[in-house]
Amino acid sequence: MILVFVTGSIAAMAQGGFQQRTVEERVKNAMEKMEALKLDKEKTARIDSIFTDFFKAQDKAIEEMRSSGSFDRDAMQAKRKELGDERDGKLKKLLSEDEFKKFKDEIEPALRPQRPGGGGGRGNN
């Protein structure tokens, strides 16, 4: 049994199941989803930069919390909201009202990391 578990764990890790994607991978994913807005090259380059800064800031905040020795989930959620609001403010200046609405309604939800097993809500029973 232990051998099966260890083998399965190693296989999952080899497939990236337990690894955080790099900033570049997350930016690439975001930009692929932003293609639905059919933006010109200048806007695309500026949005790429906005997402790069956003994901780097997220990683930095997570690393700072981990290195402090105490991971406060509420503080992390507040920081993520702050970073997301900052990103949204920059996007709002760059995108039309319709483009920003499409981003918030369709693209942003698809960018959220999906948790295995369908996510939350089960632990409250």
Image (tube, rainbow, N blue to C red):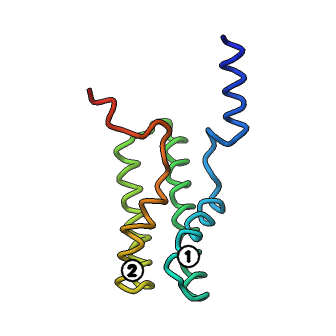
- Label of residue 72 in the image: none
Q: Which mark is residue 92?
A: 2
x and y percentages locating residue 39 in the rendered image = 53, 85
Q: Which image quadrant is residue 6 in?
A: top right
Residue at image mark 1 = 35
Q: Which sits earlier in the primary sequence, circle 1 or circle 2?
A: 1
What residue is drawn where x is 33% and y is 31%? 122
Of all residues, the one furthest to the top in this rendering is: 1
- Looking at the picture, how far across and down is residue 23, in whole percent? 62, 59
Res. 10 image quadrant? top right
Residue visible at 41% across and 40% down in the picture: 119
* In the image, residue 23 above or below residue 43: above
Quarter placement of the C terminus: top left
Residue 108 lies in quadrant: bottom left
Query: How many residues crowd mark 1 within 10 Å: few (<14), some (14–19), many (20+)?
Result: few
Q: Amino acid at mark 2?
A: Lys
- Residue 48 image offset from top left, x and y in percent: 58, 74
Q: Tell me the element at label 2.
A: helix
From mark 1 to mark 2, how far is it between C-alphas? 17 Å
